[in-house]
Image (cartoon, rainbow, N blue to C red):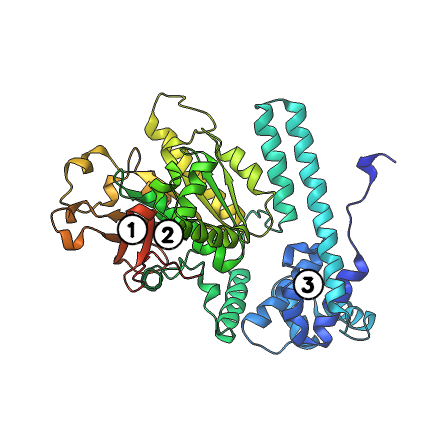
Amino acid sequence: MDILQKKMPYSLDAEQSVLGSIIIDPECFDEVAQIIKEDDFYLELHREIYGAMLEFKLHSKPLDVITLVNSLVSNGVYDDESSARSYIKLLVDIIPSSTNVKDYAKIVFDKSVLRRLIEASDAIQKDAYSEGDKVENIVDVAEQRIFEIAANNEKRDFVHIKDVILETYNRLSELQNDDSDDKLGLKTGYSDLDKVVVGFGKGDLVIVGARPGVGKTSFCLNLATNIAKKSGKSVCIFSLEMSNEQLVSRIIASEALVDSYKLRTGKLENRDWENIANATSQLSETNIYIDDTTNISITAMKAKLRRVKNLGLVVVDYLQLMESEKGRKDGSRVNEIAEISRGLKILAKELNVPVITCSQLSRGTEKEKERKPMLSDLRDSGSIEQDADMVIFLSRDYYGNDPDKANLVDVIIAKNRHGGLGTVQMSWLGQYTKFSSLEENLTEEPNY
């Protein structure tokens, strides 16, 4: 049979059964809404009816045959009450009870997925036949189309605000009934910092900036380790500057509280070996993945991250070492960095996880150590500030003349779309490449 003659997948019985179940039992609407949306229905009439039901739910109005018929006629779905009442009565008669409504909704959703796969396949074929782009770009777009369907994160032309309102209601209800604060975002593991940051939200792009040698890489590694240990989620680290072994050595030093110089030279004492054994045992239980590919692009990152299960966080060290997909077409590094910055934000949004990336500051800040970093100091492009949901600066150089504050670091939250701004003081144990809250008072005896 010619593919053009094939009908798009859909189940008339399942669509009618879902609508009929809601009419005879409006309370089951919440169960249905967790599985399907309005445009998962194949027939336009069914989309209109479901949309009318959604209106009743949002306005807390009673739903029955009479009110639904009146709404459909008022909205122009039907020209007269007789036709509307006839079809609504058919929907009611077709289903004896709403007991299996979730099963019916799942059938509707599955058919919708199949239709999207067909549409995506058609678009992929057109792209391949046209040969209008680089092969790697065509493959990436094809993979992205399928990934969006598999992750149930498909792009729609527009989402009506009423659908978002319903999702917001459900989220607020979950937060109210959940005693934990995990839903607010991934915690940093530093109590003082969490009070200001609130948490790294899904889809957030977090920029960590500092002058050379202040510890931005160590700070990001500490965050990654804390989150991996506490959340149990997969944490992926892209290290564009250091090798896997160098990066892991830093993590071990900070977790075992073993002098990083000793790790490099191998001059370890018995107590050091014990601390390392305990730390590596705990680290082995986490799901931390490291990639030390140099000059990696957003496309390559995305392809690798899509295959990671239970992804919770992505760390990139660091932004200025990345390459854009198109290179410097106009010779402008500013435009290239702008493209990379925007790509990282899109990556965070598509994968629905926070992305933390280190960023260099402009060279002028190195000559002005007496002042704190500002948003305008982000190097190469103002788009970094624009794309970021959160910007964190680390500063400790201006304490250099005060021995009592030599190990203090100001963690400056300079931008935060979802929380407050402010400065949190933390301790910096340079020999261990370790940041800690002031209240921790870490010693050379780690607590396992």
Q: Quadrant of the N terminus?
A: top right
Image coordinates of residue 86 in percent, x first then y, are 78, 69
Observer-nearest residue: 331 or 15? 331
Q: Amino acid at mark 3?
A: Asp
Give the residue displayed 72% in from the left and 66% down from the top: 102
Label placed on residue 78: none
Give the residue displayed 65% in from the left and 41% down from the top: 146
Please name which of the two marks, 2 or 3, marks the residue nearer to the observer: 2
Helix, strand or loop for disc 3: loop
Observer-nearest residue: 215 or 332? 215
Distance between mark 1 and mark 3 Cα atoms: 75 Å
Q: Earlier in the sequence, mark 1 or mark 3?
A: 3
Q: Earlier in the sequence, mark 1 or mark 2?
A: 2
Please name which of the two marks, 1 or 3, marks the residue nearer to the observer: 1
Image marks 1 and 2: residues in contact by CB distance under 8 Å = yes
Crowd class of label 2 (few under 14; some 14 to 19; many from 20; radius 10 Å): many
**Side of 294 where 50 appears, left or right:** right
Distance between mark 1 and mark 2 Cα atoms: 9 Å
Image marks 2 and 3: residues in contact by CB distance under 8 Å = no
Q: Earlier in the sequence, mark 2 or mark 3?
A: 3
Helix, strand or loop for disc 1: strand
Q: Quadrant of residue 366?
A: top left
Label placed on residue 257: 2
Q: Amino acid at mark 1?
A: Leu
Label placed on residue 79: 3
Q: Amino acid at mark 2?
A: Leu
For label 1, the residue is 429
Image coordinates of residue 265 in percent, x first then y, are 37, 36
Helix, strand or loop for disc 2: loop
Q: Is residue 298 above or below residue 47?
A: above
Image coordinates of residue 285 in percent, x first then y, are 55, 54
Does residue 386 appear anywhere in the picture?
A: no
